[in-house]
Amino acid sequence: MTPILLIVDDDPDDMAFTTRVIGKKHKEVRCVEAFNGEAALEFLANSEILPAVVLMDLKMPGMSGIDVLRRIRADKRLSHLPVVIMTNSMLDSDRSKALSAGADDFMQKAFDLRRYAEEIAARLERWLAPMETSGHPTPLT
Amino acid sequence: MMLKRRSIAVQAARRLVFSLGLFVIVVGLSTAAFYRTALDKAATERANDLRAFYVSRLTQIERDWEVQARDFRVRIEYARILEQPHTAVLNLQAFMTVQGSGRNFRYLLIGSQKGEPIFRFGKGMSSAGLIAQLMEGADYYLDAETRQLYRVYEEPIWLGNQGMGRMWVFFRIDHALLGHLASPGVTLSVAYNGTPLASSLGARGLLPQVTMPNARSRTLPWRGRADDPVQMTISAPVKLLFSTMELALAVSVIPVLDGLILWFALGTWLMGHTRRINALDRALRHASGKTRDRRDMDQNLRAASAGHNDEIHAVAETFRRTTALRDEVERRNANLNDNLRRQNEQLEAVNAELESFIYSVSHDLRAPLRAIAGFSTILEEDYGKKLDAAGKDYLKRIETCATRMSERMDALLNLSLISRHEIVCTEVDLGRLATELIAELRDSAPARRIETRVGEGLVAFADARLLGVALSNLLANAWKFTAHTVAPCVEVDAVEQDGERVFFVRDNGAGFDPAFIERMFLPFHRLHPDTEFEGTGLGLAIVERVIRRHGGRVWAEGAVGQGATIYFTL
């Protein structure tokens, strides 16, 4: 079964970069795009198959990444979902904010697209692996 | 030496008791002396009263005796003693026995005009030369043999047909008479021409030792005339003249009463002051205590000073003014603190604004920049083959510019983060920090050969993270500006200057024009073109801000082509 990746990002450019770098390296996964938090939650509520990983931008209009994350953690059906929070900001405080809200991983979007591709790949490798081993890996730092 | 704390009230009480004792003794003695004089005077007055009383008693006796003598004359004239001597004598004897008893009548003598004795009545008197003596008109007769004193009354009488004769009647002044006359406790004695002859105490009263020591005496002539040879002395002891109560009152009660009044007045006055001092003490304690009850303090101050204008009042007033001044200072301080707090709040608000601004710079500006760079990359990846060399170059330039702008934004963000970073000072080993940073720099450019020297014991008290940032910038600069230098050398060490530890980072690189030394530490101010040395223009600005936040100074020395040395203190 093709694993699903849910990508939540309000910036269409960023969304394009993310889907591009994933599509290039992981042909086996299917990306679902949500351009705001409400859409992401709606998808999660209605989809029969849950995504393997959620990649979510921190700063979004309306519900922020943290708000969506809290909803996911509060929902019994969704609470186990691996969630990676991404941000364009360079502030360190965002990392602790995300992790304390229950994010499984955190990453700053690298400026260079090639490095960004490497970082995304590293995350996916880490969070897609449990599908087979069912272990719980520690977040990348 | 620590003095034992003793209340003024207790001290005052002790002094009062002591002074009362002294007062009673001194005033008592002097008053006693005074009263003695007064008492003496009073005693004299009372003795005089007594004298007046005896004068009247004597007058009475004299009158009685005189009346009796006249009575005798009438009787004798009636008895016609010369005509019927025998009957007359019997009658007279009977009469005189009755009349004379208890009246001290002792003797009666009748003589002729010429002085011949005619009749006598009574015994025990020698009559030798008696008539001759009586003819001279004496009022008294002292019997030389018996030493008995008599009062003598002479009456002219008719002797039948023979004409005038004289009659002398004798009344004896003796112990018994005086004994009857005297009031209880009073001693009467009689002297004739200064010789004591009779006393109310009997013969005992004539002895000198019987005279009472503490007595008042008054002498009065028997017949009330000053030239009277018979004088009666009245002696009365003082204790008879005054009652015991009178004496006790006179000697002791009045001075004691005076003392008590004085004592009470002084004591009340002192206790009043003590109460005021206590009130002052309470007020002072209120003021210095942790819980300052303003109202209670004012009340005590009022109690200490109200209605008086003395030293205590002055102290209370001074204290009140001082307290008011202090309150005023505290109020101003509180206002100042209020202002400070308000300014702090405003500052926090500004900080929060700044933070959100930085966040949007960091996020919102970075996102489109990243898109520019990202799409440049995609363009190159996907359509690179369709572009010629010039097209590829333009694409590369777009990417480079975007990247440079991103780096500058990051540096700017770092600069603002340094300003807001909370400083936590610990002991930092600057030498070790430098060594680690140098190792990182070597790793990043393994091809370069740079000689480095790090001094020993470079320990500073600073915020480890910020100092790391500053040192990292300084070493990165040194690395960068020695890029075109032959035999590059970077040195980290410290020197003592005016008793101050001055750290420095020195290189032998490109150096700088000292004319621009002022502007070196300003943000985005670069002394070299990007084509020569790349940079954000923020490195030294970050260093300056880190050092300034530590309260230190930073300055530079160098010249073009001769390297640069950046000094700093912490």
Image: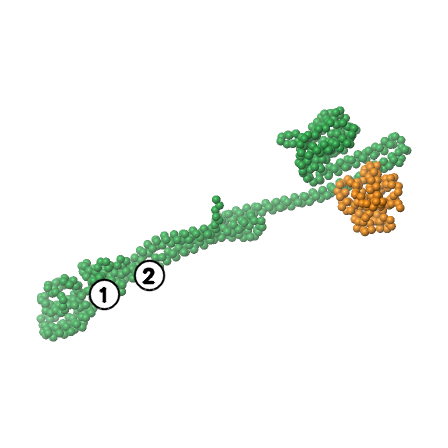
Q: Residue B412's x, y, as percent?
A: 75, 37
Q: Amino acid at mark 2?
A: Thr
- Label 2 to label 1: alpha-carbon separation: 26 Å
Q: Chain of mark 2?
A: B
Q: Are marks 2 and 1 on the same chain?
A: yes
Q: What residue sits right under mark 1 in the picture?
A: B179
Q: Is residue B478 visible?
A: yes
Q: Residue A56's x, y, as percent?
A: 82, 44
**Left or right position of B323 against A48:** left
- Comparing B104 with B48, the one in front is B104
Q: Characterize the local packing of mark 1: few (<14), some (14-19) or many (20 or more) Cα atoms within 10 angstroms.
A: some
Q: Residue at x 62, y 30 (%)?
A: B498
The quarter holding residue B104 reads: bottom left
- Location of residue A122 with respect to A39 vertically, above or below: above
Q: Residue B213's x, y, as percent?
A: 26, 57
Q: Earlier in the sequence, mark 2 or mark 1?
A: 1
Q: Residue at x 89, y 31 (%)?
A: B388
The quarter holding residue B489 reads: top right
Q: The chain drawn orange is chain what?
A: A
- Comparing B440 with B472, the one in front is B440
Q: How is the image coloured?
A: by chain
**Left or right position of A87 against B258:** right
Task: Kindly state the secondary structure of the residue where label 2 is placed.
Answer: helix
Q: Residue B501's x, y, as percent?
A: 65, 32
Shade of chain B as shown in the rendered figure: green
Q: Chain of mark 1?
A: B
Q: Amino acid at mark 1?
A: Gly
Q: What residue sits right under mark 2 in the picture?
A: B244
Q: Is residue B160 visible?
A: no
